[in-house]
Amino acid sequence: MSLIAWSCFAGAVGWAQPAVRWIIRIPEATPDIVQVRAEIPRELLVGRPEVELRFQDRLGTPSRLRSITARAGEVELAVDANGDDGRRIRLGSEPKAIVIEYTIVPTYPYGSAQRDLDARSRVSSALAVLRTASVFARTNLTAKAHVRFVLPPGWVAVTPWAAENDGFAIPFENHSQVEYIGLGPFEMREIGSRASLRIGALPGQKGPGVETVAAIVEREISFFGRLPFAVGSLVIVPPSFMSGGASGAHSAVQGPQLDTLAHEVFHWWNSAAVTLGETGWFREGVTTLYGLRFATESGAFSEAQRNACLADLNAEMRLLEADHAVSLGEASSKSRERAMERLMYSKGALFALTMERRLEANGRRLDEGVRAVLNGVRTGLNNDELKRVFSGVYGDLVDEYFDSYVMKAMRLPEMELGASSTGASGCAYFRQR
């Protein structure tokens, strides 16, 4: 076994306060299992009759938690059930440091990791991606944490946390945020100066290498002029390990499809915090268009690939609106329905492209409005508020577009997209046959 740490990272933080020390062990060549040890110092337990643990991602599958024990020195402590997803450890009258150890299956979403390639957290004999909410138990302790990984030989940890000593430091305010951690024989690169992003990709895997990924990310950082965090991470995994991608607060895990990769990275800025349910078209549609743009501008995607993707999105939109047009506000509000969700993506992207063309014909750029929304401190925007932001940037140049397609249910005009739909791009789930 080897202990993995980012000792070269300059942002390491020293702890003045006691911290919970977590040790995450991946047994060699053992799929599905993670062994976890939490060491809690006495100072954090004074005045507490018990420690509560919550396993957030168990989702009614108690068998995922294979075993759990707790002890204070040599004395074993009782571990009681506490609701569907919790455990309670009762402490003695004289508080002592305690050690909690458990074994858990971290696969998320739940199901067979071999059959369900949408799993965003799982362990294989070749690599692992851990969703923090599927591994770490949340506690009722107000404390920082230190995490150390014990890994098979040749494996490294790609995390969004500051390096400290032999592991990583997690501020207390970040405990409840979901992150994605890559563990495996990754090749890594760190980009950024005042803020840092760690990129991990498997050497020789089919798909983009570290340099290609870095080129896409650097285009997006240049667009916004900043990273939205002090430290972040991005892990690229083979399509046989998972499909699609997922973003955490400071991290992302991603298959090798380049437009999806650029899409997920863009969500670090265009996050769910910015928009409400009815403005999901901006979060997903605008992100889809800009993901295609940055993948193309970085040289990772060809112009022909971009056009083919747009053509397939257009075919999907036309099919889903065959019976009647749907407003982007309605599609976003009903996005739990699969067809409405896809309209939020496809019509949202093509609506953004329609606005972009209108603005460019008047000597303006869509970039101005997108930055105005995403580079500020705005949160929870509804469609009226989004329209006001765009009106503040462009006057009334795109007001009628918001009225017709976002607020009202009108079909977008036909557009020259440079390609015909074949369905081969992988960008659309529904398409004309």
Image (cartoon, helix red, strand yellow):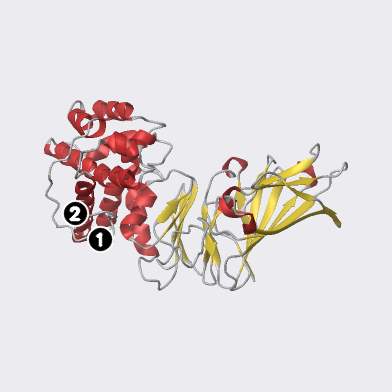
Tell me if residue 331 comes above or below residue 60 in the rendering: above
Q: Nearer the viewer, residue 21 or 71?
A: 71
Q: Residue at x 19, y 52 (%)?
A: 315
**Badge 2, how many Cα within 10 Å: few under 14, some, many 20+?**
many
| Kind of element beneath mark 2 | helix
x and y percent of residue 60 in the render?
59, 50
In the image, taking residue 389 as reference, residue 6 lies left or right, namely right
| Kind of element beneath mark 1 | loop
x and y percent of residue 211 in the render?
37, 63
For the residues bearing labels 2 and 1, Cβ distance under 8 angstroms: yes
Query: For the residues marked 2 and 1, what is the alpha-carbon distance in whole angstroms?
Result: 9 Å
In the image, taking residue 344 as reference, residue 308 lies left or right, namely left
Q: Mark yes or no: residue 247 visible.
A: yes
x and y percent of residue 64 in the render?
62, 58
Q: On the rendered image, what quadrant is the N terminus found in?
A: bottom right
**Badge 1, how many Cα within 10 Å: few under 14, some, many 20+?**
some
Q: Earlier in the sequence, mark 2 or mark 1?
A: 2
Q: Residue at x 31, y 56 (%)?
A: 259
The residue pinned by badge 1 equals 425
Image mark count:
2
Name the quadrant containing residue 399: top left
Residue type at tag 1:
Ser
Q: Residue at x 21, y 29 (%)?
A: 403
The residue pinned by badge 2 equals 311
In the image, taking residue 347 as reference, residue 374 lies left or right, namely right
Residue type at tag 2:
Ala
